[in-house]
Image (spheres, grey):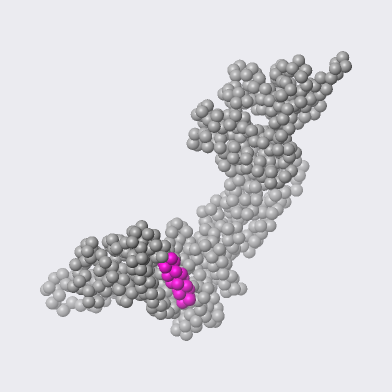
Amino acid sequence: MNIEDYRSGIMVKDVYNIYMTFPSDVKTSIDKNNGVERANVSVSTADGLALNGEFGEILTTSETAIKYLFKKKIEDEKDLDFTLDQVFLLLSDRVKGKVGFSPQISENCPAFNVNTTHLDVLCHQMDRFYKDYFNKAIAPSFSEITVEIPCGNSLDDTKQLGNNIICLCEAIVAYKEQLPAKSKIKLYIDTTGGFRNAAMLFLIVGRIMSYLGIEVANIFYTSWNKGKCTVHEIKDIYDLLDLIAGFEEFLMFGSAKKLNDHYKLDSFVRTKGDQDLNQKSINDLIKAMNRFSDVINISRRGEFKTELSYLAERLSKIRFDQDSSVEDFNYQLIKFLREPIEKEYTSLFEPKVLNTNDDLSYVEWCLKHDYVQQALTLFKECVPTVLIEKGIIEVDKDIFCKYLEEKKLSQNKSVLKDAFTYWLNEDSKRKEDNSFTFDEFYSIYAKNAKLEVDVEDLQDKVFVAINDSRLDFIKNYGDKDSLDKSLKGIVRDYVAKIRDKAFKIRNAYTEEHEQKRMLAQELNYLKEELLSKIFAEIALYKFVPVKDTSSRAQEIISFLIAISMNGNNLRSINNLPIKLRQMLLRQMLLNGNKEKLISFVSDAENCQFSFEEKDINGARRVLYNILKEHMEAKLVFSDITKGFLLKSYNFEREAKDIYNEYNTALYKISGVTISSRSEESLAKVIEVLAYYFEIKKSRNDSNHARIEESSQFSTSSEIKSAINRAINLIRELTE
């Protein structure tokens, strides 16, 4: 029966039970009676099942586990409605084929004949059991819910084995997709029959199903000895794969999820004596691993060291426990598996790390285990601490606080001056009265202002001041003016190209759809060519390009394509950023077009345009001309770079300038100095700071899920490389 046939009969319920087995073949024997040879079925018994009457007779080993499952569920667990909803059978050619019964077989087994297959025998046995064994018949019958997956004559072929795994998985997934959404599926696996490697195949399929949200509820194996079939539950052995995977997961990624799922904390069955202590040791270790995993996930720097110490202690307890008198499997296995973890975490367990503030070791560990987000957070938090506590950057708190007060006064002065001017202009009498000046007013304010600096977050204030002063100090290092000029030339050529290309295509093609098709093709090609030239030019000047569409340059380019495709798109000009519209309006009015174009301006104050149909072509030509001849490059290209390309930046030059101008003072910040008078060391400090602030941008980008990254480091490999570079420099400065 296939899934489509069964779909109409699916009952809506919370849990669906499915079964997977590799049916065994039927064994026959030859009896001699009065000189006549007759083929009979070899009959075994179900040992330990206490099956009544003929139901205890086993004709094919595979039926034993199914009977065991139903007995356990219905009689032992009192799940009276238990049934199997689908049975997946991996069939060899032999099991699909005829048993080879002689014609006389019907005398002893009327249900069978010369055409009976091995699978027929299994279905017959189970249908009888379903119908007559319990107080009520089990529905649907076994033979109605089977799905057959042929597997040939052998699983020795690796390719064939892979195909069988995929076919079996596809069949199960196909069934799952027929069920109501959010249905829970429990999978029972019988590993008894089939080829020798069938059990391995089923274990692989079980892992795949677990990954797809299907619970492996139980696994069976039926042993045969002298005509007795005994069913064994081997789910515990299967679960050991989870245990080992859990240790590997913790080893590789510092995650204790699988271990936490395997060992239900505080749920051990308490015994006596040493075994109870062993189980407590396991419990404590798993708790320690789980706590450490939590700290990693939430990136709490202060707790990182605490939980590391606790984890090291728990591992050592198991390591140095010499009492092996209690042969507890879980304990002995963990004792065996903890060694790789100790080796992997050795750098963090060393006393010099646990007993000092070597926070950089934690960052390095996170990077090694691909915890990039955690590394970013720890790096952002610990680098200022390391630089200050190690004396690389020295801070005189009193002087620096005075610097902040003066800076705040200066900022307030600008605001107060604007307010004072507004106040004077509001009243003509006050404006005419020159007896009270702003300087007099400000001197009184400055004398009495209380601008105390909160020293609780002084470290953060130091690094904010460093970044502000650094950006101000280096703003003229790169030749941005020459870059803007060069980019303007590239865009100017592009405008001429698209204008000419659009004109030629409209003249060459009369059909409107052909015009649009060719325009789209050619203009998109020119756009990609243009952007490639722009990004290459930016890199040539050792800046980092902004490649997303948020920059003003990209918006202008997209607008040009739109109006070149269709003049009516000119009306979307009001969607451009206000600064771009202001530029266009200025240039319109400055270049002899005032009388002609003023009618296009519907709201000059808000820079809103309005075009009639008859104005479209003329206005488009004017815009082409403005962007070709009169574009304000500094405005258009102001946000198309992310700053200097750090890999190409001359930190030695900056260090020399700082050294010559401020000596040991860091930029012009009062109270913030560097400990070394060496220009070489100063260059390293400056490089660390440059990387720190750029990496901090990466952390903010990832934390806020920004699509447009502000940092030049956007990929995982770039971030890891940058952090490692900064850490190596700090190590060199502290040696």
Q: Quadrant of the N terminus?
A: top right
> Is residue 226 shown to the viewer in this render?
yes
Residue 301 seen: no
Side of 54 relative to 396 (left or right)? right
Residue closest to the eye, 634 or 700: 634
Q: Quadrant of residue 592?
A: bottom left
Splitting the image into 4 quarters, where does residue 282 fall? Answer: top right
Q: Nearer the viewer, residue 384 or 12?
A: 12
Image location of residue 289, percent across then percent down = 61, 50
Q: Residue at x 28, y 61 (%)?
A: 568
User: Residue placed at 77% from the left, 29% from the top?
Assistant: 224
Is residue 602 positioned above or below 11 on the image? below
Tell me if residue 529 is in the magenta stretch: yes
- Judged by its main secondary structure, the magenta piece is helix
In the rendered view, does 488 fall on the left or right side of 652? left
Residue that appears at 46% across and 66% down? 711
Query: Where are the magenta residues, as a range?
Result: 525-546
Q: Position of residue 558 (x, y in %)?
A: 37, 64
Residue ID at (49%, 36%): 181
Is residue 611 left or right of 673 when viewed as pictured?
Answer: left
Q: Nearer the viewer, residue 636 or 600?
A: 600
Q: Position of residue 683 (x, y in %)?
A: 52, 78
Query: What residue occupies the far bottom of the structure in this picture?
Result: 660
Residue 265 x/y as whole percent: 60, 41
Residue sitting farthest toward the right: 35
